[in-house]
Image (spheres, coloured by chain):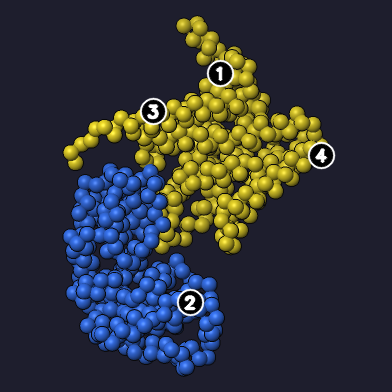
Amino acid sequence: MDTLYGLFIAPFADFGFMQRALIGSLMLSLGACPIGVFLMLRRMSLSGDAMAHAILPGAAAGFLFYGLEILPMTIGGLIAGVIVALGAGAVSRFTIQREDASMAAFYLISLAIGVLMVSIRGSSVDLMHVLFGTVLALNDEALTLIGGIVAVTLVSLAIFWRALVAECLDPLFLRSVSRLGSPVHFIFLGLVVLNLVGGFQALGTLLSVGLMMLPAAAARFWTVRVEPMCVLAVLIGFASCVAGLLLSYHASLPSGPAIILSAGVVYFASILFGTRGILRARIIHHRHRTA
Amino acid sequence: MTNTCLTFRDLTLGYGSHPAIHHLDGTIRKGSLTAVVGANGSGKSTLMKGIVGVLKPMAGEVIRAPGVRAAYLPQQSELDRSFPARVVDLVSLGLWPRRGLLGRYTRQDRDDVSKALMAVGLGGFEKRPIDTLSGGQLQRTLFARVLLQDADLILLDEPFNAVDAKTVGDLIALIKHWHGEERTIMVVVHDLDLVRQNFPETLLLARQPIAWGETRETLKPENLLRARRFHEAWEENAPWCEPGEDAHGHGHDHDHHDHQHGVGPRAA
């Protein structure tokens, strides 16, 4: 019993920074995982990755002027993300270029500017911090910010749920009954940016998209409905955060990669054992019903 | 005029600078059942898109009588069949006009969904994932959604594609039932026998209307022959259609369009 306590409870009970890390990452999962499910269903998984890179120059600008302060870096990241999302979205809507290409162009330019800005001022340690984050150094300010972002995300999802599902499932139908199609697309992109920005203090700009996509990708193997998929993604996100933080604590690993790798383990397990996974498909193949 | 559902006024719809529907004038009566026929590329689907409003006119306008709600079954639906949804989720989208973004689905709504599925012969399919449906079953599912939309104006774009004979019969019966309820219906169809048997009125299109009115009149051999001569391809260097001359068709090869059919549907 004591060893179990020592393994699983004590790290969180004894250390304030672990508690903050836990609260912060759990809150992040609550908002980011459902967003990830919709990103995946809209075949925009890699757009999420591109957006994550795109917020770097904004964060770097905040860092350049104010140092390692959460608020300026967050606001900067938000602005950069929105510019890239709207810019890429507008180019794809008003020209012949598809969104994947315009997104790639915008985020690469954005990323280059970001790296340039960080290198003007800082050492590579700073760059590492912006790129990879530190979930173990979340302060009250950061937690409040994440909490706010999660609240906004969940409320927006609750309000626009039906439109978002319709826009994914049958966009032409939605256009024929309502004008919400385009607004919902941009609101959704806004939520993506918001959640990536929320995650980058904890996980870094590169890995924050991991907590968004991996649980969603894993949940896809278990269910054929959106609602349970979102719930399952959140639960997988929770489990990955707890496992990752414990792993990071006991094995002295960096916390961000530990969390994402935990989600990666769940992902691979789901590919193999999920109800729509590889093994199940092979086994069921041999048996069928009469009708 | 109160029994007019749709009015086309000098309507030109198209893609780029090329018209797919060229200067269409005329009206669709409330409660009418019209087949829209024509060769590939003659503008049938484009007209549907124009009416429902997903394609903006290049010139002219479509005027819907006030309060008329449209339901639209597109030829190429942008439906994502890999999306994790069940039949009941897809059909429930048809509740949008009734419940909108935030309205709660009531027990009554859920019963209506079941009834709509029943009406298209898919009772008990509620929980089936949509990626397990056959093409015909999916088509019937989309019919159920149209049914649920409870619209005054129903636009069906080639609804009988890839549908077996029995199902076509069922769907025709459904369309006639709607017709009996005084709904206005326009259906794009290729099978002329089907049109002759079931549709009182027909619009024969070849970018502009060749004939429009009572089905038997419209589908006369000479009209069909004229429609068949229609040249599908765009010509990059086709002359620009100038406002002065196009309105009444002087010197154009489409000068028949604006006189003949305008009276057709009203007379019918």
Amino acid under disc 2: Trp
**Separation of disc 4 and disc 2 at Cα?**
56 Å
Name the residue beneath numbered marker 4: A120
**Separation of disc 1 and disc 3 at Cα?**
25 Å
**Separation of disc 1 and disc 2 at Cα?**
66 Å
Dot 1 or dot 4, earlier in sequence:
4
Residue under disc 1 on the same chain as residue under disc 3: yes
Name the residue beneath numbered marker 2: B234
Name the residue beneath numbered marker 1: A246
Q: State the residue lying farthest toward the right.
A: A120
Q: Going by the image, does B72 lie left or right of A209? A: left
Amino acid under disc 3: Phe
Give chain B's shade.
blue
**Separation of disc 1 and disc 4 at Cα?**
36 Å
Determine the secondary structure under disc 1: helix
Q: Chain of mark 1?
A: A
Amino acid under disc 4: Ile
> Which of labels 4 and 2 is toward the front?
2
Residue under disc 1 on the same chain as residue under disc 2: no
Question: Residue at the location (52% across, 52% down)?
Answer: A185
Determine the secondary structure under disc 4: helix
Give chain A's shade.
yellow
Q: Which mark is residue A273?
A: 3
Picture coordinates of residue A235, whole percent (x, y): 45, 29
Q: Do the residues under discs 3 and 2 have CB atoms within 8 angstroms?
A: no
Question: Residue at the location (41% across, 80% down)?
Answer: B231
Residue A176 sits in quarter: bottom left
Residue A92 sits in quarter: bottom right
Q: Do the residues under discs 4 and 2 have CB atoms within 8 angstroms?
A: no
